[in-house]
Amino acid sequence: MIEDTRLQTAGGKATAGGARAARRPVPVRRPEVAPAVRAPGEAISPLIEPTKTLLALKHKHLLGIDGLTADEITLILDTARSFAEVSTRSIKKVPTLRGRTIVNFFMEPSTRTRSSFEIAEKRLSADTLNFSPFQSSVVKGESLLDTARNLEAMAPDMIVIRHKASGAPHFLARHCRSNIVNAGDGWHEHPTQALLDAFTIRERKGRLKGLRVAIIGDLMHSRVLRSNIFLLKTMGADVVVCGPPTLTPVELPRLGVGVTFRIDEAVEGADVVMMLRIQRERQKGGAFPSTREYYNLFGLTAERARRARPDVIIMHPGPMNRGVEIDSAVADGPYSVILEQVTNGVAVRMAVLYLLAGGTLGELAD
């Protein structure tokens, strides 16, 4: 969730698809944002469309998807669309966060998420500090809170954290003044991954509401699963999940999703199929006899993919285990959007950082 977050328009009320233009211009304390009213032929700001300038996230943190409203999710996705359009015009850098310092505090290995945040920060002209636990006092026994407080003593504006402990970003949000962005916490949530997944789906399908989304794999240990369920259900999608019974949490039906242990049933008629990695590093025992048997029962093959809709898109948050949860012919096939997810991650993370920074710069004023 984004703590203490609300949507605000010129009249003080949120709207579901963006804010209407105000009767009189509303001064915004962010000079990079386009004015609310644009004369015919006037160039649009490369950052935010005029109709979005009166809609803003307020206050501190992005800790998870759980608790976000449909309006807030839509705002983030619309803002990401504007940043994606910037990239298509070969504008690699904008001054939005010039003078701001962001700490990338990654306590677990990461390739896509960490690199994506770093690129997003550089494109927003922020100063960045990349924190590695193996080259820090963490290896000497320093606690998470002491490490964070020492980093904060250097006055960063934001801390992007990935941690093996569920709830670590929430803990920092209670004790630190900096904005906290959750880049994945234990088995709990991975909000920016769900946002980039939703962005990719919306770019391909034009909508989220009413789509049938099948999520298949290690359901027990997946923070990507939880964030995607919260987001997709909030936006009106129909979600079905599938995995081995030993890797399926018993509480999933209470989240409003369908549960099946047969991949053919899950894929049947799906608009989107999202495969999840088997997370052996989080498993404490043998959840299945062998990877060969797992592939035979739950792997996405070309034959199984044909059960989905003809215009299905195939997704994977990465890293992929080819020949375990997904066949290479499917991962590299014409319906795969896996590399598009990586590309879209930069725009989505730019949007998150931009909107959170906007909240610290000042509220919309009359």
Image (cartoon, rainbow, N blue to C red):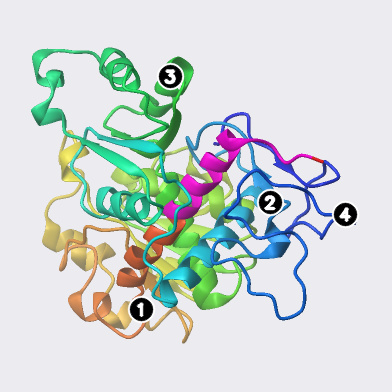
**How many numbered marks appear?**
4
Residue at 40% over, 28% down: 169
Tags 3 and 2 touching, CB below 8 Å: no
Q: Quadrant of the C terminus?
A: top right
User: Dot 4 corresponds to which residue?
Assistant: 24
Given this view, does label 4 or label 3 mark the residue nearer the observer? 4
User: Dot 2 corresponds to which residue?
Assistant: 71
In this rendering, does residue 187 appear at all? no
- The amino acid pointed to by label 1 is Ala
- The amino acid pointed to by label 4 is Arg
Q: Is residue 10 left or right of residue 228?
A: right
Spatial separation of the CA atoms under disc 3 and disc 2: 27 Å
Judged from the image, the secondary structure of the residue bearing numbered disc 4 is: loop
Spatial separation of the CA atoms under disc 4 and disc 2: 23 Å
Q: Position of residue 333 (x, y in %)?
A: 28, 83
Q: Nearer the viewer, residue 49 or 164?
A: 49
Judged from the image, the secondary structure of the residue bearing numbered disc 1 is: helix
Q: Is residue 39 left or right of residue 233?
A: right
User: Dot 1 corresponds to which residue?
Assistant: 305
Q: Earlier in the sequence, mark 1 or mark 3?
A: 3
Q: Earlier in the sequence, mark 3 or mark 2?
A: 2
- Crowding around mark 3 (Cα neighbors within 10 Å: few <14, some 14 to 19, many 20+) is some
Q: Earlier in the sequence, mark 2 or mark 1?
A: 2
In the image, residue 227 above or below residue 106: below
- The amino acid pointed to by label 3 is Cys
Q: Nearer the viewer, residue 260 or 357?
A: 357
User: Dot 3 corresponds to which residue?
Assistant: 176
